[in-house]
Image (cartoon, rainbow, N blue to C red):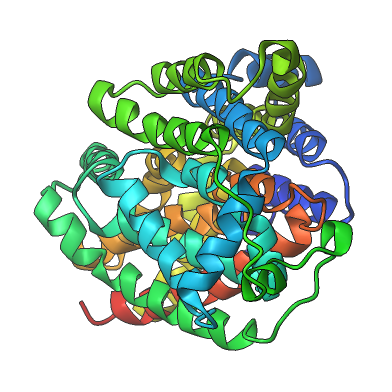
């Protein structure tokens, strides 16, 4: 057990989480934790920082997309789209507040399968509705949790879009470690993860059902305006912003290019006059700056993944874990998920870390004579654990970016901790039980 606790990956993730809880900047926490992992793995500080910066920015396509998508959110604020859209939505839904988390869950599933924009859809949907959510006193923690659940159901359980890509990664990672499986086997085994996500949604809706007070700018309440029939008129600039947001999705689906879709969106905003040329520089820079930090942290997470693969001593971690587990499937499944959680928490992306997690979990699963379905589920669930609650995950960073436009949503306290508790605990419990049954 001591070998496990002193493993470079385990120690570095513990330090990273502790630093984040102490309000240390997430980007700086990832750098320091990465250096710790490399030094504990036998590298010098120079070698550690070298492998870190050489591996930053391996997903430049996503970085460019997120940077440019921030301009759309800034344009919506610039044109007051929320002031126009919110009272109209309020009249449609009435007092059915429970619809908000369920709709976001459904949109998240669609964003991972049929409309391939991932969690970035929040940057289109949330900004114009934030005042409405504030007026309804909906706890934004609940919306972060349900969004994460929808995303994970999408890529873990549907062999379409990003889901098919994720399952292909799982399939290749399992094959490289001695377990051949089909895509059909993967999505069927991962249905257990969907059950855990449903449990998480129910628990979150029970916990955060009470109204939460947020400061309403200008003391203007959307509901009051709707009730008084003082709904502001829709102007062409509002329609132009909404069409530009829709264009991002359509062009991305048709061309398969995220950056091209974002550039076309900016062109539409300028051509239609939604952003006046005299204000373009101000709006553009505001949008870029709102997304820059998210992109920086995502790039750092990729570098952390490279560090753990190089200096994390994963072979020693497998051997030590096998000795501790013995022949217990229950304890083995639980420990496998916890190990997966530690590995993926630092990296923050299930897609990036499944190959790393598989090198640990597949040998342990075969050692315990687990079924292929159980091993598949544990590997996929370990990746999902890292997506939920990790400070460097785009499933927490982007919701924070969307909900914190008015400065009332903290990344660690309102995104990371709630999603970690309400998603990871049900996921570990349900998958541990299932691994001993299937």
Across and down, in percent, residue 360 comes to 42, 49
Can residue 164 be seen by looking at this rendering? yes
Can residue 145 be seen by looking at this rendering? no
Along the horizontal axis of the image, is 103 left or right of 374? Answer: right
Determine whether 134 is above or below 169 in the image: below
Across and down, in percent, residue 361 comes to 38, 54
Please name the residue shown 55% across and 29% down the image: 69
Along the horizontal axis of the image, is 153 left or right of 82? Answer: left
Which of the image's four quarters has the N terminus? Answer: bottom right
Quadrant in the rendering for residue 169: top left
Q: Nearer the viewer, residue 211 or 309?
A: 211
Across and down, in percent, residue 287 comes to 68, 28
Please name the residue shown 46% across and 30% down the image: 244
Determine whether 95 is above or below 354 in the image: below
Quadrant in the rendering for residue 229: bottom right
Quadrant in the rendering for residue 76: top right
Q: Nearer the viewer, residue 147 or 234?
A: 234
Q: Nearer the viewer, residue 91 or 157?
A: 91
């Amino acid at each position: 057990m001591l070998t496990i606790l002193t493993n470079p990956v385990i120690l570095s993730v513990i330090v990273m989480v502790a630093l984040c809880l102490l309000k240390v900047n997430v980007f700086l926490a990832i750098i320091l934790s990465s250096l710790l992992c490399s030094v504990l793995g036998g590298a010098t500080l120079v070698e550690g920082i070298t492998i870190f910066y050489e591996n930053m920015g391996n997903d430049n396509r996503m970085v460019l997309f997120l940077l440019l998508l921030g301009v759309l959110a800034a344009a919506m604020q610039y044109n007051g789209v929320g002031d126009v859209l919110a009272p109209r939505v309020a009249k449609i839904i009435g007092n059915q507040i429970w619809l908000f988390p369920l709709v976001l869950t459904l949109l998240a599933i669609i964003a991972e399968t049929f409309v391939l924009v991932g969690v970035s859809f929040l940057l289109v949907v949330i900004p114009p509705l934030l005042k409405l959510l504030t007026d309804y006193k909906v706890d934004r923690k609940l919306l972060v949790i349900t969004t994460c659940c929808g995303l994970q159901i999408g890529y873990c359980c549907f062999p379409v879009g990003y889901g098919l890509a994720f399952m292909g990664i799982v399939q290749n990672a399992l094959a490289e470690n001695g377990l051949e499986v089909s895509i059909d086997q993967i999505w069927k085994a991962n249905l257990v993860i969907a059950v855990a996500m449903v449990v998480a949604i129910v628990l979150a809706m029970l916990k955060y059902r009470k109204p939460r007070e947020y400061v309403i700018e200008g003391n203007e309440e959307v509901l009051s305006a709707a009730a008084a029939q003082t709904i502001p008129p829709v102007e062409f600039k509002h329609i132009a912003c909404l069409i530009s947001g829709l264009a991002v999705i359509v062009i991305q689906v048709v061309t398969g290019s995220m950056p091209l879709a974002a550039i076309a969106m900016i062109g539409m905003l300028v051509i239609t006059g939604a952003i006046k040329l005299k204000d373009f520089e101000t709006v553009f820079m505001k949008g870029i700056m709102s997304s820059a930090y998210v992109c920086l942290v995502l790039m750092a997470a990729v570098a952390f993944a490279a560090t753990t693969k190089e200096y994390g001593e994963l072979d020693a971690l497998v051997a030590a874990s096998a000795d501790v587990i013995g022949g217990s499937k229950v304890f083995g499944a639980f420990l496998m998920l916890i190990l997966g959680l530690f590995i993926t928490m630092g990296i923050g992306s299930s897609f990036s870390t499944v190959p790393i997690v598989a090198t640990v979990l597949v040998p342990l699963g075969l050692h315990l004579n687990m079924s292929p379905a159980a091993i598949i589920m544990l590997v996929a669930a370990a990746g999902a654990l890292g997506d939920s609650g990790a400070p460097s995950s785009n499933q927490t960073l982007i919701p924070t970016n969307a909900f914190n436009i008015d400065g009332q949503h903290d990344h660690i306290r309102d995104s990371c901790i709630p999603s970690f508790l309400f998603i990871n605990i049900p996921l570990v419990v349900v998958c541990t039980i299932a691994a001993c049954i299937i």
